[in-house]
Image (cartoon, helix red, strand yellow):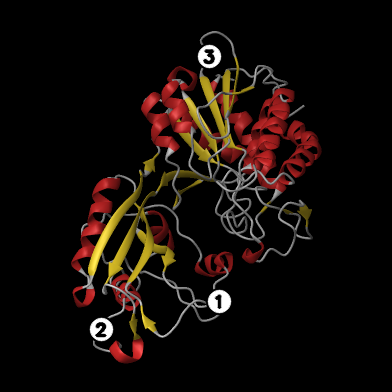
Amino acid sequence: MQTKDRVAALMPSLLESLERLVAIPSVAFPGYPAEPVELMGHQTLDLVRAAGFTNAELMPVPHGYPPIYAEVPGPPGSPVVMLYAHYDVQPAPPEQGWTSDPWTPTRKDDGRIYGRGAADDKGGLVAHLGTMKVFDGEPPCTVRLVVEGMEETESNLPEFVLAHPDLFACDVFIVCDMGNLRVGDPVLTTTLRGDVACVVTVSTLQHPLHSGVFGGPAPDAMMALARLLTTLHDADGNVAVAGVSRNPWHGGDLDEDEFRSSADLLDGVGLMGTGGLAKRLWAEPSINAIGIDMTSVAGSSNVLIPQARAKLSMRIVPGSSPEKELDALAAHLVAHAPWGAQVSVERTKTAPPFACRTDGPGYAAARLALEDAFGKPVEEAGNGASIPLLGTLHEVAPDAEFILWGPEDVARSRIHASDESVDPSEIEKLIVAQVGLIERLAGR
């Protein structure tokens, strides 16, 4: 039986497994119940073992939820491939605006399966299960698997990798936590932006003051903070921080109408920045205020605010230094303090960007496998997100190649947002591609 036929025959049971996993609210964030995450870990372990990884185990870790690790040896001297996915998910609060229950997997008229984690990354996990099932648990090369339990929060996997580097020695990492730009059009992700963050505090007064008696001459901290934040972009919405890095982009571009639809922009809202969308998303920095601390609307009164804080997240381009980029952002914030306000910056995060090697045999094999699976030429794309783990894996396996793909089509999947969904055809074709890649690496 041809690979495509074998995968098609497996899909009903694989989608049943996916729906069972989506129904488990495996949110590993602090403050959420541990029982669903633990249940998810054990259910995933059962499925991994049933797929052919008979020696799979939940690995002991000093803190947090355990990763699953497994290995199926191939013929002596054969290449080693490591598969990666994660079993935890983002929260799905009602205020996100879900049109169906996020923990009830729902098949809608468009054929997609809706629910938190359907794409990110339980769909990727199911793709790995299907890949091993095609081989009946006997792949033509050594296959290792790690399924993380805390990817969406403060990950404990880098610490585990550094403590057990021998477990992660391989020729190729297959990271199934990405996706095509749109359904049916195959893409290999080659770059990821990094992520740095800080908390900026603006202080103008020793204590609150009556806004009628002092308002006007005396600056309140919230207005000073707002004015400071506006200096981070120019009039077109480009990042205006001196010293931050930018890259050229030579790959394909994105359709603006499709992007606007995917982002669900409100009527009349324009896009920020200039140049191609792909360049703005994958080769340019971006800065967002992702949190504000000050008096709430409900608790407000007629007083000037003495202090206000904002948490800023800046995505940085491949090849840049997280520390230097954050230094540039901090220097800008201090230098642009309005009205002599006191500005302090607390650095909270430095996650490096990542760029895949694209001149190796693994990458070449992946392109051919993906093209065969989808029946179309393969494009290269970047991704604006960050996966700090990749730098750690590269550290312990410096000669290994990285293949970044997955079932999370950018145009529709809405990962981390309301109505997350996956197209089953993306999982099916991805399994075909993974089988083809492993066979090519084994010389078949």
Q: Mark 3 or mark 2: which comes first in sequence?
A: 3
Residue at 66% in and 35% down: 38
- Which SS class for mark 2? loop
Q: Is residue 306 visible?
A: yes
Q: Mark 1 or mark 2: which comes first in sequence?
A: 2
- The image position of residue 132, as x and y in percent, is 67, 26
- Under mark 3, the amino acid is Ser
- Which SS class for mark 3? loop
- Under mark 2, the amino acid is Ala
Choose mark 1 or mark 2, whichever is in front: 2
Q: Is residue 247 visible?
A: no
Count of residue discs: 3
Q: Residues within 10 Å of mark 1 (few under 14, many from 20)?
A: few
Q: Which quadrant holds residue 401?
A: top left
Residue highlighted by disc 2 = 218
Quadrant (top left/top right/bottom left/bottom right) for the N terminus: top right
Residue at 77% in and 52% down: 104
Residue 441 vs 334, above or below: the answer is above
Residue at 33% in and 78% down: 223
Choose mark 1 or mark 3, whichever is in front: 1
Q: Mark 1 or mark 3: which comes first in sequence?
A: 3
The Cα–Cα distance between marks 1 and 2, rounded to whole angstroms, is 36 Å
Residue highlighted by disc 3 = 78
In the displayed structure image, the side of residue 288 where residue 417 appears, left or right? right
- Which SS class for mark 1? loop
Q: Nearer the viewer, residue 220 or 235?
A: 220
Label pair 1/2, CB-CB below 8 angstroms: no
In the displayed structure image, the side of residue 334 where residue 315 appears, left or right? right
The label shown at residue 266 is 1
Farthest bottom residue in view: 212
